[in-house]
Image (tube, helix red, strand yellow):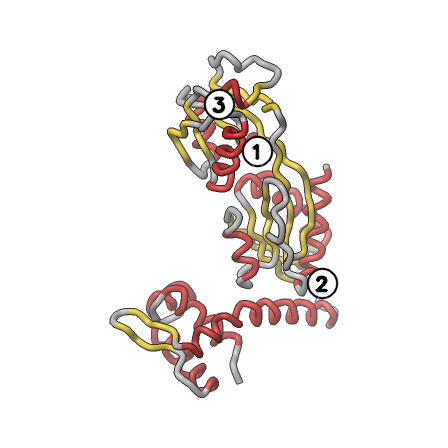
Amino acid sequence: MIEARHLRVLRAVSATGSFSAAARELGCTQPAVSQQMKALEASAGTTLLIRTGREMRLTQAGEALVRHASGILAGLTAAEEEVAAIAGLRAGRVRLVSFPSGSSTLVPGALAALRAEHPGTRVSLVEAEPPRSVDLLREGDCDIALAFRYGATGGEWDDLVVRPLLTDRLIGLLPEGHRLAEAPSVSIGELAEESWIAGCPRCRRQLVEVCEKSGFAPRIDFATDDYPAVMGLVGAGLGVAVLPELAVESVRPKGARAVPVEPAIEREIVALTLPDLARVPAVAATLDQLARTAAR
């Protein structure tokens, strides 16, 4: 019989390329990883890994097993949580992944309300931007992914349960001494000759697309995933930027002015989960609290 713990180890070896690296990732010893792989190969009745130099390579059977492992582990997690709830255990565990501006604005209020209503439910949080956060969900490494997108992309999330939360408008950031810093709003075209400071890769692509629609290519002199760094660079007079309103709310822009951008540029904020996980009470309760917090 193939055991879930063996599948987790196999997936770690596949991702890291060695027993020692997999052991570090899993928090165990290298001999323990080796023993579990031997047990898994015995259960499977065939070789799953081949050592090539310093790295481990999957055999065809190993590749097939890794391909199915994520779905199997996600299904097992859903089954364990649902069975525990049915058995009357008023407890649960939710692994949440969020992008940074969501972590500092939506998540705290939602988790505080969840703890007050369901004190036995434990929620862990790690940060990742989409599409990596969505990959973590599909791979079985989290239960809910807080994500965003600019405009609906056909088929992007068709295999997931999508819980819309809010629409987040992008806000222009200008140095306080900028000629347009006191304007009630600013058009992207008015900033065509400016030096730009860009955010996360997905936001960066959106910025380029919007600027190109206005007839110019932005000169991006600085790029960083760190929102406080973006605001610091703008505040120092090194360029202009557009950031999601949630990001502007989460960090006080020192030396920078927030100005609405016209035409409006918006992103959709959603909570994503797998269909099986959506039926788990702790996951459903967390989704509900995220929606309530976003509606305030």
Three-letter code for the amino acid on which mark 1 is drawn: Pro
Q: CA distance from mark 2 to mark 1?
A: 31 Å
Number of the front mark, 3 or 1: 1
How far from the left and from the top, in percent, is residue 203? 51, 38
Of the pair 24 and 46, the residue shown nearer to us? 46
Three-letter code for the amino acid on which mark 3 is drawn: Lys
Q: Earlier in the sequence, mark 2 or mark 1?
A: 1
How far from the left and from the top, in percent, is residue 214? 53, 25
Which residue is tagged 3? 254
Residue at x 47% of width, y 35% of height: 199
Number of the front mark, 2 or 1: 1
Please, what secondary structure does the residue beneath circle 2 have? helix
Residue at x 62% of width, y 41% of height: 151
Which residue is tagged 2? 279
In the image, which disc is placed on residue 244? 1
Residues tagged 2 and 3 counted as in contact (Cβ below 8 A): no
Q: Quadrant of residue 239?
A: top left
